[in-house]
Amino acid sequence: MSEAKALPLRFAPWLLLLGALTAIGPLSIDMYLPSFPTLNQELGAGVQLSLASFFIGMAMGQILYGSLSDRFGRKPPLLAGLSLFVLASLACSLASTMNELIMARFLQGFGGCAGMVISRAIVRDRCQPSQAAQAFSMLILVMGLAPILAPLAGSWLLVAYSWQSIFWFKSRNVYLWVSSWC
């Protein structure tokens, strides 16, 4: 039995990491919601389309990442998706038109869903059925807390800095995770 399976799930470091990966999607959805009025003023109308494009990218990515992680293992598609997320977050922060933001948000959703999809697959790989139920409960808890905390964090960044800081914050933190795995 591996060391991770011998530990109680609530103390498993890999489960905390999977929780953080699971939170990327909900954080990306809700963290920039407080900046909608500012984005409308600075980039023009259509900010709602940036949210819709994120959801479309996320839906399309879920289809792809499951298959890729089964074919090539968990780590390569996860790193590729998170790298795309980082680059797309940087593109969001540098967007000067609404069309650029909409396209960057699509790519951000496409890359960001890798953490959500592959973290579930990792739980199935590492856990017995009884432990998997506990692990999935913890991941669902994170997915439930992220939409509550994300607008608060986004509001704080918006007031303290600017709407671009929301995307810089996400790209920086995910970049740090990705670079620590490589």
Image (tube, rainbow, N blue to C red):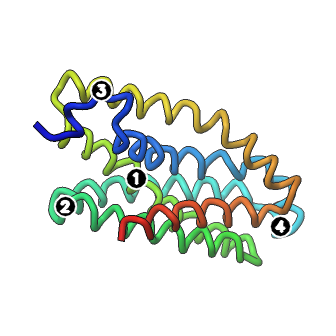
Q: Residue at x 71, y 77 (%)?
A: 94
- Residue 8, label in figure: 3
In percent of width and height, residue 68 lies at: 23, 62
| Dots 2, 1 in contact, CB < 8 A | no
Q: Which dot, 2 or 3, sits closer to the camera?
A: 3
Separation of residues labelled 2 and 3 (CA atoms):
25 Å
Looking at the rendered structure, the kind of residue marked 2 is Gly
Q: Quadrant of residue 72?
A: bottom left
- Image height of 152 relative to 75, above or below: above
Q: Is residue 56 left or right of residue 63?
A: right
Mark closest to the chain's N terminus, 2 or 4: 4
Separation of residues labelled 2 and 1 (CA atoms):
14 Å
- Say what secondary structure mark 4 lies in: loop
Mark closest to the chain's N terminus, 2 or 1: 2
Q: Quadrant of residue 82?
A: bottom left
Residue holding disc 1: 115
Q: Nearer the viewer, residue 94 or 44?
A: 94
Residue holding disc 4: 44
Which quarter of the image is occupied by the C terminus? Answer: bottom left
Q: Which dot, 2 or 4, sits closer to the camera?
A: 2
CA neighbours of label 3 inside 10 A, class few (<14), some (14 to 19), many (20+): few
